[in-house]
Image (cartoon, rainbow, N blue to C red):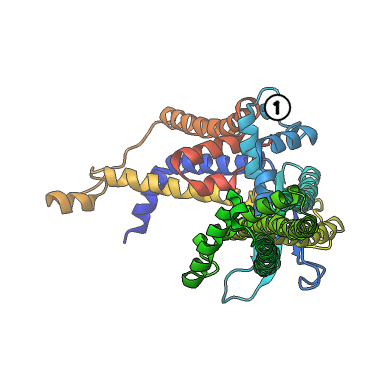
Amino acid sequence: MDIRFYLSLFLRHLHWFLLFLIIGSALGLTLAKVLPPVYVAKARLLMESEQIPGDLAASTVQTEATEQMEIIQQRILTRDTLLDLANRLNIYAGAPHMSPQSTPADTIVNDMRKRIAITTTGGNTGSRNPVRATLVAVSFEAPTGELAATVTNELVTRILREDVAMRTGSARQTLEFFEQEVSRLDAELTTRGGAILTFQEANQETLPDSLEFRRAQQTAGQERLLQMDRDAALLAERRRGVVAQQAAAEEANTAVGAVDRTQEQRQLQTLRDDLTRADAILSPENPRRKLLQTQVDALAAVVAAQSEQRGVARNGVMGGAFIAQLGEIDAQLAFLDEQKLQVQAELARLQTTIEATPGNAIALDTLQRDYANVRAQYDQAVASRARAETGDVIETLAKGQRISVIEQAVVPASPDRPNRKLIAAAGVGGGLFMGLAMVILLEVLNKGIRRPADLNSALGITPFATLPYFRTTEEKWRRRVIIYGVLGALLVGIPIGIWALDTYYMPLDLIIDGLGRRIGLASLTSAHSTAFA
């Protein structure tokens, strides 16, 4: 290997090497100097479990720690909250290119969301893994350490406030729900109880609880009716005996002259004969026999009255006693008939109520079942309200699950990025690599003959001697002036151009972030995801 030859080739293209080296170094050093510092302040939070054992007094807020933290995070990252935070803390006061007056709200919101980081670790990661403490890391990126710490602590304050508001609000809503439920069920109980009372008052005589009593009354009434029938039969028999005695007396008094009998007496005798024959073949309860007995009794009373009117002294005295006995017996029979009508009416009423009892029992059972269901719901709602009251007290006193601060955000002593040494080294290294690559590319593309060995290998000609190309002094100076002028212009112009671009047009971090999003370099975007001047 002819090292001197390759060294001469490198020196021939040294200006290209220096050009790229100066460009890379200028870019790297300028970026390392111009890129704004990014300070990151961090705070650590702990999701504490309930302070009171759940088997003694349970909270009504059953949200998991990680779920609750995600809800809080989404509430904090809302548009209105971020804009209020940016305006109240003057986050963009030192960034004219992103002043709240000239910058769209969406841009500010997106930038705030990129700078805020809320990370949750630990918790219940699975059924097979042990439960770990839930830790929350909150951080914010800012151009100054004081601003980063201030915003981070403000985010922590909002997280704590949201946590308390969520838990107390949920407990309060639970309590209000059960209070409304108890009131509703109490009113429904009153309504259903009133319906049962109204039904019972409207159907007092047909309720199932008095069914046995009414059946006993019905049995007693039937027995009483039978007794009245027996009493009426005895009185009727007694009346027939009295009438028969009176008739026998009249027959004895009128035995001397049968011709003196009146037409009523003859009819009475005929009816008595018919009654005697009927007694021989008919039962006492036969309707025909009863009809004959009634006719005999009626006609006997008529005959007795006629005998009294005839003024027979002995018969008159006997007729008066006879009429008195018949009147007493008839009064007793009339009283028994009246009592029988009353008992029969009562039995009919009892039968009607007994027949109506099954239907009323079903209706009353339906009302009572509905009342019992509502009462069970009411009792459950009262018990739930008691638990809700306990849970509300627990959350009000912050004895349930809560978020506590274990490390406040402090002002960082040094910026988190950019790594200026790494950027400068990358610029210089990139310039070196691009310069060497340019030299190698020029030599690969150059197919000319540059030394005697190339003549021999390419054409098979062996030269006698070689003469180098000599430049004049003027050509040398002109060439040097052009090379050094271009290199000097790049060495001075690149930093000035980058500074002017960053100062008067757009900060470099925004430009780098936009280029990263356009060409899909997420790492480039994340490395410079700030928006500060």
* Image-quadrant location for residue 321: bottom right
| Residue wearing tag 1 | 99
Of residue 11 and residue 31, the one placed in the foreground of this image is 31
- In the rendered structure, the answer to whether residue 233 lies left or right of residue 461 reads right
**Residue furthest left in the image:** 460
Question: Mark 1 is on which residue type?
Answer: Ser
Of residue 147 and residue 486, the one placed in the foreground of this image is 147
Q: Tell me the residue at 54%/58% (across/down).
A: 271
For the question of whether residue 289 can be seen, the reply is yes
- In the rendered structure, the answer to whether residue 286 lies left or right of residue 321 reads left
Q: Tell me the residue at 62%/52% (across/down).
A: 260
Q: Is 483 above or below relative to 219?
A: above
Residue 301 at x, y percent in the picture: 68, 54
Label 1 Cα crowd, 10 Å radius (few <14 / some 14-19 / many 20+)? some
* Image-quadrant location for residue 401: bottom right
Q: Is 188 above or below relative to 317?
A: above
Residue 309 at x, y percent in the picture: 74, 47
